[in-house]
Amino acid sequence: MPAYHSQLNSDDNRLIGNLALLPLRTQYKGPAPKSNDDNDIIEESLYYFKANVFFKNYEVKGAADRVLIYLTLYISECLKKIQKCPNKNEASKSLATLAVSSFDIPGDSGFPLNAFMTKPSNRAESDQMRQYFTQLRQEVGLRLVEKVYGADDKPSKWWLCFTKKRFMDLSLSGPGK
């Protein structure tokens, strides 16, 4: 069975490096254009996460797939953080901190997806990519907490059971973490 690919792959997408700069339904500031569409790349990555996380290989079919790969790895990191949080409020704080904490971008030696993504060509593109990743990370954290925590303020075991899975045998936090 093949992995799920982004429905947003298109030649019309604006690019940063070889990543698609996709419209987002977000409240956070950043380079991504605003969208009112309910199905943005973040919803897609949350929807396909549980199926895609089992794959060790992933064929990239477009620039939006690279964003999907990054978000899948980031969701895995978020679930590891959520697992340690006793309630929804603590999880929100933890993910907000994780979103703005220091992270590697393509071209950095610690970035696990250098084989899939090209490094930014100049300083301005590097800054724009970092802002885009921050915007994506903030919005993913916000939406993931809503999905994982139910009305009883307890995390769903059906989400947390994926904390030990490693998509493509990679992790954004580095080896052994």
Image (cartoon, rainbow, N blue to C red):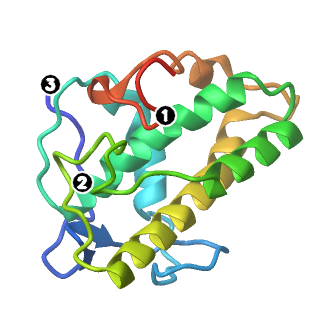
Tell me the tag on residue 65: 2
Name the residue nearer the viewer: 105 or 49.
105
Indicate left or right for 28 with 66 as reference.
Answer: right
Mark 3 or 1, which is nearer the eye?
Answer: 1
- The x and y percentages for residue 67 are 33, 56
Task: Report whether residue 65 is seen.
Answer: yes
Residue sitting at x 62%, y 59%: 138
Name the residue nearer the viewer: 69 or 105.
105
- The x and y percentages for residue 8 are 27, 65
Crowding at label 2, few (<14), some or many (≥20) Cα neighbours within 10 Å?
many
Mark 2–mark 3 Cα distance, whole angstroms, equals 17 Å
Q: Which amino acid lies under the numbered mark 1 shown in the image of this protein?
A: Ser
Numbered disc 1: secondary structure? loop
Tell me the tag on residue 173: 1
Numbered disc 3: secondary structure? loop
Above or below — where is 51 with respect to 172? Answer: above
Name the residue carrying label 3: 1
Q: Quadrant of the N terminus?
A: top left
Numbered disc 2: secondary structure? helix
